Image (tube, coloured by chain):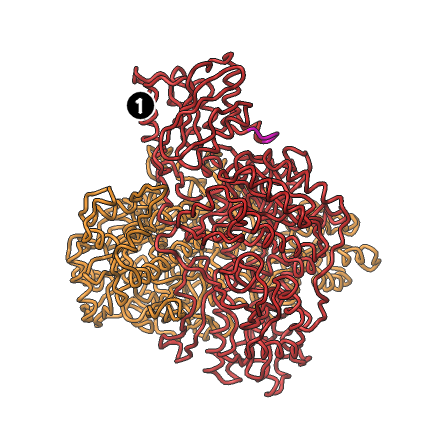
Chain colours: A orange, B red
Amino acid sequence: RSEVLKLNEDPGVHGVCLQLPSSVLTSRVANALKPEKDVDGITDLNMGRLVRGDFSKGFVPPVASAVVDLLEKHDAPLEGKTVLLVGSEGPLGFALQCLIEGSGMVALKSQWSSASLQRQVIIFSPYTFTVEVFFLNNQANSARSGLSLHRFKNKKKKKKDLCVFYVSDIEISRAQTPKPVTQLAEEIGLLPGELEAYGRNKAKVRLSLLDRLHTQPDGNYVLVAGITPTPLGEGKSTVTIGLVQAFSAHLKLNSFACLRQPSQGPTFGVKGGAAGGGYAQVIPMEEFNLHLTGDIHAITAANNLVAAAVDARMLHEATQSDKALFNRLVPSVNGVRKFSPIQISRLQRLGINKTEPTSLSPQEVSRFVRLDLDPSKITWQRVVDTNDRFLRKITVGQASTEKGQIRETGFDIAVASEIMAILALADSLEDMKNRLARMVVGTSRRGQPVTAEDLGVSGALAVLMKDAIKPTLMQTLEVRHERITLNKFFNIKCRASGLRPNVVVLVATVRALKMHGGGPNVSAGAPLPKEYIEENLSLVADGCRSNLRKQIQIAQLFGVPVVVALNVFKTDTLAEIDLVCQIAKECGASDAVPCHHWSQGGRGSVELAKAVKEAVSRPNNFQFLYNIEMPIVEKIRTIAQKVYGADDIELSPEAKAKVDYYNQQGFGSLPICMAKTHLSLSHMPDKKGAPTGFILPIRDVRASIGAGFIYPLVGTMSTMPGLPTRPCFYDIDLDPVTEEITGLF
Amino acid sequence: RSEVLKLNEDPGVHGVCLQLPSSVLTSRVANALKPEKDVDGITDLNMGRLVRGDFSKGFVPPVASAVVDLLEKHDAPLEGKTVLLVGSEGPLGFALQCLIEGSGMVALKSQWSSASLQRQVIIFSPYTFTVEVFFLNNQANSARSGLSLHRFKNKKKKKKDLCVFYVSDIEISRAQTPKPVTQLAEEIGLLPGELEAYGRNKAKVRLSLLDRLHTQPDGNYVLVAGITPTPLGEGKSTVTIGLVQAFSAHLKLNSFACLRQPSQGPTFGVKGGAAGGGYAQVIPMEEFNLHLTGDIHAITAANNLVAAAVDARMLHEATQSDKALFNRLVPSVNGVRKFSPIQISRLQRLGINKTEPTSLSPQEVSRFVRLDLDPSKITWQRVVDTNDRFLRKITVGQASTEKGQIRETGFDIAVASEIMAILALADSLEDMKNRLARMVVGTSRRGQPVTAEDLGVSGALAVLMKDAIKPTLMQTLEVRHERITLNKFFNIKCRASGLRPNVVVLVATVRALKMHGGGPNVSAGAPLPKEYIEENLSLVADGCRSNLRKQIQIAQLFGVPVVVALNVFKTDTLAEIDLVCQIAKECGASDAVPCHHWSQGGRGSVELAKAVKEAVSRPNNFQFLYNIEMPIVEKIRTIAQKVYGADDIELSPEAKAKVDYYNQQGFGSLPICMAKTHLSLSHMPDKKGAPTGFILPIRDVRASIGAGFIYPLVGTMSTMPGLPTRPCFYDIDLDPVTEEITGLF
């Protein structure tokens, strides 16, 4: 603010174009600026306020829109003049693309490097003017207040005629003032009583909505999947959001995107946030990436309450007689002794049909009070929502108060909890509660599964999770966006939900295809090898004919049409893009289209949306890959051979023993969820393309009885990521004055 | 609902009095009930709707209020009739007390047992009628819908003339429909932009409020403390809430209660919730006790991100050369290499005033990249918000991926995190961020403290905590209620905040006083010995002259007047109550008054509020107990002798070494926060009263540099509670249809 006041008094400054977060502008700074110093109309661009209307109707990139407005307003004052394009960080090429494509301008040169000041001549027929690109310091926080104003002041002295700012992901997110979520909810037809707002920008949707809508016909269900990705990710989230933006804002079709809430582990670790990117984002992205509505925290709390109950129970059983346990578990309250409902459930499972505590025989008391958990067969792990590799394998109970009851165990990342899977699969509070009760935490010394309900904790779990099951409603840059935790597994989700996908959108990138075609290794943090920056049609073609073809075939196994969405990067050439689309169609895709949602928002995904709409109208012969009653080993083999392309599977002795145990316990007809690296179709992350001629090793087989599936562990699979030497958190910061967050992308 | 429909058609039923949560009533059930079956006016009582106006103005217990209404409406139809008083659980004696005291009735007999159906003759001058008490099943969930309606139907056949339900804590909470928090905020003068609603009933208050109000004079600051409690707790929360209810609703003085958010560990463990009780509650209590606005989850996430960063950093330093570390910590991005701001801070602390990465000498690179943490001197522990005793002492890093970097560490309960202390002490975002950056996580091999900022994580911590620092606004049954995390320590909080308490309210109970007077042991879960149920003036007097007197003297050490609040239980006799008040005044209390907030809400605390108001007007000579510049050991000795009554202190060799180290590091002038059992003034939990003649053993001395205090560990103090054999979670359950929670008290 004091910077602004200084600029007001500086006779050398003829205009000020503020690039500040709207929160600051609205409160104090905007009022401090004298009207005569305000650059025509452009201030509003940066405040994201005047262009709000455009956002919610159809998408016009705000940069171009503001330029066009200015041209119309001033009868093309830019003829022969220079436009200053200022960006704090992020791919400036896209800004220019917006400027050009959005306004009908023509660029004389299309080559932009992102290193320093650039000049470019633009023809906006019939006018010609020059665009000068100016980079602010690459660090987002220096792009704020002081520094950006200071630099800007220097630029102003050069008397540019128009200034346009370009903004990075988080700035795009911030520049757009989200609709109040209550208004959003009303527009999409939710009743006020069906909404629980969490602040201004997010809300929980009550499950009563399901009752109200249960007679409505189902909509079309589009599954967005991807080819085998590089470690950098190929953009399933952005494609999903872009597609919804295209459907809703451009094709005027009601649509919702369902995304999983991002885990904070990767956000602060190596991957960063997961709100989409560019002009295809969930907003506000800070809220999407941090805490959100606390669902993962609830999972963590519930999961760890079970873990604490397991160990405490083992300790109490080890140190107390049957009688002492019974007196404590069924205490006399005001002279009355009785079982709680959860204890009556346990008695019934034990075949003891009594409800009067004093009527139990000593033997029945013993069976009731002793879960008799085998410490070496506890399968329940603790969780944290942090990439904490040192918790992968730990020993607990080493304090003297635990009387030597030490054992080895470990922590998983919170989203790997069975409770997360239950949240994704449960279709009502009752279903969730029943699944939570059925979760198996370990095995008794007599070989019987012990459940959360046996521990007496399942009611408390349902209470902890009662809000998490409600979907969270947020919005995208252009339209609306609903997140509901869905695992998009045909064989599990579709069986559990009864939903049948009408079409699969398969996301591919030229980068990943080149990798599958034999390109060099791609890893996070390291610069991309030149093969990925320059045109290389042969690598692209080989990638298409291996991994992409195989992925299309996999989707077709389920009888569902496939549309390939090529997520276009700025380094992709037209020839590469055309080649991918051509081969994809040859390999059986219903259609294959390039997507420009990152730079253009929904407008860049209109072709994809049209292709999806067309594919939805085709006949759909959805079928499951295997009969659920097939033996566990056969189901695993079917997946390995038909989906992954393995010759066969090989079970370790441990895996075999587990299969026998699950069959004996009656869990044999559960579906299978393979726990395998996502970096290859095989179990070997470095085998790209469509590997063949391998035997898939099944190291162990585990069961999530509550969630309702068996999950074989294929090769080594970590359920707890680690932190790199320089984690994302190094760049994440909070300005204590503006409350603005930097470094969270 | 189907139960209601059945009742509608049943000619034997002449009226139905529904005892259902209002959420159910409002949606479907209320409409299902035929008007002719509705019992006069009383339905509204149970729906908590017609009496809402009374709640927000002055407090009339709803039971009595409804009876009075009915008497007025029908010209005393109860003359000679029978009133049925139905309660699902909870102390029914209080219901009757409400009925009697609230309506001016006189009971002929005051003895009520809580075992079965009771009859009582009531005189409501000039009418006489009979009250019959009927207990529903003791389990809250059977008091719902089906069972209660069924039993009620049977009662109806006996043709009672009036039915009154009594409700338990959670039912009282539910029966009262809370004001929308937006309306509440408006009434207390918050601007819409200063509020972030979290659902309908709770909101965060933005810190911008502090800016707006900073020219306002401070209000009076009342500290609510307690005498040494029994393990059952003596009601500091209920007294606090009762006091604000009295101030706001009855004395018409603006007042706010500030409570700490309850930890979920005890909620599901042994203690239960912490929302107050009876007619002195924070509502809705379910939301207060569960997740709330996620502040403790945020603390957990932030604390554990630091822990993961500590171990990952030690691993990376152990396995990489200086050069490799430097290349990763300061990578080349698009050909540019530069330090992040957090790294420049570290360089400055190291005395390296360079900002160009290539200009560092190899020696400087080594000092920059190596925190060189000594694994045996890591003081940072992980946390969970669960009573998980098996995590007290653990070994981490045992997976082969951690390359043998195993070490012993442990988890604390989340609220014991230094980040919790910072949240309680920080007065702005900037202050919080600075404190987070200063937190010391361990010591380098060269003996230097290593901070969160050295780890590069402090900006991310501030981002994770940015919402948690905002106070959460909720309301009490009668008025409003603001929770802000405050540690009420004179020597720490008052120094940090500059706030000076005007009066101390010292909460006592006859039960705790009897214990201090020599009564038998009191423990959670076991029935109370008869000394605590029957009148015993000698035990009470001895307790007053030992612990209560000492506690009054402690408060007077700080020059602040003391008002003793005797939290009255139904078993206390008039003689006992009078005796406590008399001795308290003899011992120097400004005043001593019995409080009946539990049964009467704010009306029961009006005398306390008046006494507090009177004490506030007295001269206040607030002084600190010690000069902050005194040596650490002297400060500890001063507290031990003047506050606890010890003869002296004795430091272990470890404690002495730590004191030397802190002095050397310049931490010597921090205030002291003793970590000692709260169950005795000494370090021995079984020494009640006012122990003397003991030497206080200082086992270890630790420092929370970020929060800004030194904390000596006195004797054994657990920072991780355990679960009992039958934890609270056994009774906690969720009805999947009504979404009602049971067993959470």
> Does B686 appear above or below B128?
below
Q: Tell me where residue A742 sits by quadrant.
A: bottom right
At which x and y percent is residue A42? Answer: 68, 51
Q: Tell me where residue B344 sits by quadrant.
A: bottom right
State which chain disc 1 sits on: B
Of B363 and A581, which appears nearest the observer? Answer: B363
**Residue count near mark 1 (Cα–Cα under 10 Å), binned few <14, some 14–19, many ≥20:** few
At which x and y percent is residue A505? Answer: 35, 53
At which x and y percent is residue B637? Answer: 64, 69
SS at badge 1: helix
The N terminus of chain A: image quadrant:
bottom right
Q: Which residues are magenta?
A: B56-60
Of A320 and B427, which appears nearest the observer? Answer: A320
Query: Is residue A25 visible in this depiction of the protein?
Result: yes
> Does B191 appear above or below B466?
above
Query: Is residue A563 visible in this depiction of the protein?
Result: no
Of A275 and B99, which appears nearest the observer? Answer: B99
**What residue is shown with label 1?**
B154
How many numbered discs sit on the rendered protein? 1
Q: Main secondary structure of the magenta part?
A: loop
Q: Amino acid at mark 1?
A: Asn
Of B726 and B26, which appears nearest the observer? Answer: B726
Residue drawn at the location 77% of the way across and 57% of the way down: A2
> Does A631 appear above or below A270?
above
At which x and y percent is residue B727? Answer: 38, 52
Residue B58 on the magenta span? yes
